[in-house]
Image (cartoon, rainbow, N blue to C red):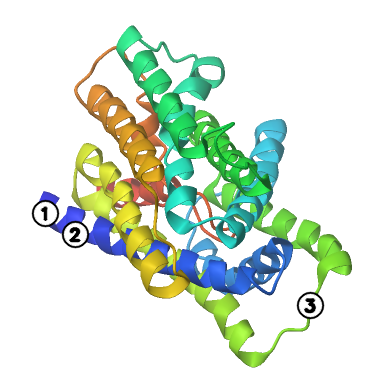
Amino acid sequence: MNLKATLLALLAFAIYSTHDVVVKHLGATFSPFQIVFFSALFSFPLITLMLVRDPTHGNLRPVHPWWVALRSLCVVICPTAAFYAFSVLPLAQVYALLFSTPLLVTVLAIPVLGEKVGIWRMLAVLVGLVGVMIVVRPGATDLNLGHLAALVAAGTAALQSVIVRKIGQDERRVVLMLYPLLISVVVMSVAMVFVYQPVAGPDLAGFAVVAVFGFVATLLMVSAYTLGEAALVAPMQYSQIIWAVFFGVLLFDETPDMATLLGAAVIVASGLFIIAREATGGTSEQTPVLRTRSRGLSPGNFRVSQALRRTERDDKI
């Protein structure tokens, strides 16, 4: 089962990477606000199919309105920042910076979840931040808004993941899925007054591909985490650096430099150490990295952890 789960996760992240290639292509013409708007819009029918099957009783009033509002804001900011970063930076460089998300989850789990982080995991976070500095090379290269956007995307992805971990057992799945999607559409509708560009048929198909690929990849991740151990499935996200190099060279004439690859290797090593530390016990009680399982960069995506809760309930029944 672990082998099948690993293969499903690898396939999921290959689809995610193809999703990001389409985003990068669309970003050459359209604002990230417009890409997020259409992606969220096309996600509505897909998410609705899941919501109508939600067996839990209750209304749409959040139990934790402020946490839901903050998470919804993160869901708006995260894909917008990520999509902008994809449009202006090489794929490999964006992924290297996004790989810092587990490090930020570890840090944010301290104030939000009351997690106690031991010396080894904190050292891993510091080493990972050194990897981030190797990638961005302040002073040696010209930093631009793309680098900031990638780090903002990583930070908001980490924050929304930790918030789901905090309130996920109390809130209905429909609340956690519907509010961010609605707010994404509303906010991006306002933004498009200023940035809208006419959309041709092929571009409209591209927006649909972004929504469908994000949805399908997340379903595959749900299956992977259902079948296999989280400690084996989670590291598969780092396979995206291989796809980044492949697609970058093949489609965008991007050849990652040695500093980017070295920095990515340091960040990946730090993330793997944290995953292994949580999986083997260590000092973590909440295991926030292993239990906040989703990429979190697509506006219409449901959370892996939300779908897993439903799967776990079905298994008990």
For numbered disc 1, what is the local secondary structure? helix
Kindly identify the residue that appears in the image at 57 percent across and 40 percent down. Answer: 141
Furthest residue in direction bottom, as rendered: 201
Residue of label 3: 197
Where residue 273 appears, x then y in whole percent?
26, 27
Q: Is residue 74 rendered to the left or right of residue 270?
A: right
Question: Which secondary structure, mark 3?
Answer: loop
Residue 49 in view, yes or no: yes
Check the image and report above or below for 114 versus 162: above
- Vertical relation: 181 (above or below) 265: below
3D distance between C-alphas at marks 1 and 2: 6 Å
Tag shown at residue 3: 1
Viewer-side residue, 109 vs 235: 235
Residue plotted at (64% across, 56% down): 84
Whether residues under marks 2 and 3 lie with C-beta atoms below 8 angstroms apart, the answer is no
**Badge 2 amino acid:** Leu
Horizontal relation, residue 234 to residue 168: left or right: left
Looking at marks 2 and 3 on the same chain, the residue that comes earlier in the sequence is marked by 2
Q: On the image, which quarter does residue 192 sit in?
A: bottom right
Residue wearing tag 2: 7
Whole-percent x and y of residue 89? 55, 55
Comparing 53 with 215, the one in front is 215
Inspect the image, locate mark 1, and give the three-letter code of the amino acid beneath it: Leu
How far apart in space, not on screen, are marks 3 and 1 (Cα)?
Answer: 45 Å
| Image quadrant in which you'd find residue 86 | bottom right
Q: Residue at x 59, y 31 (%)?
A: 139
Instruction: Check disc 3 and give the amino acid type.
Output: Gln
Q: Is residue 65 left or right of residue 316?
A: right
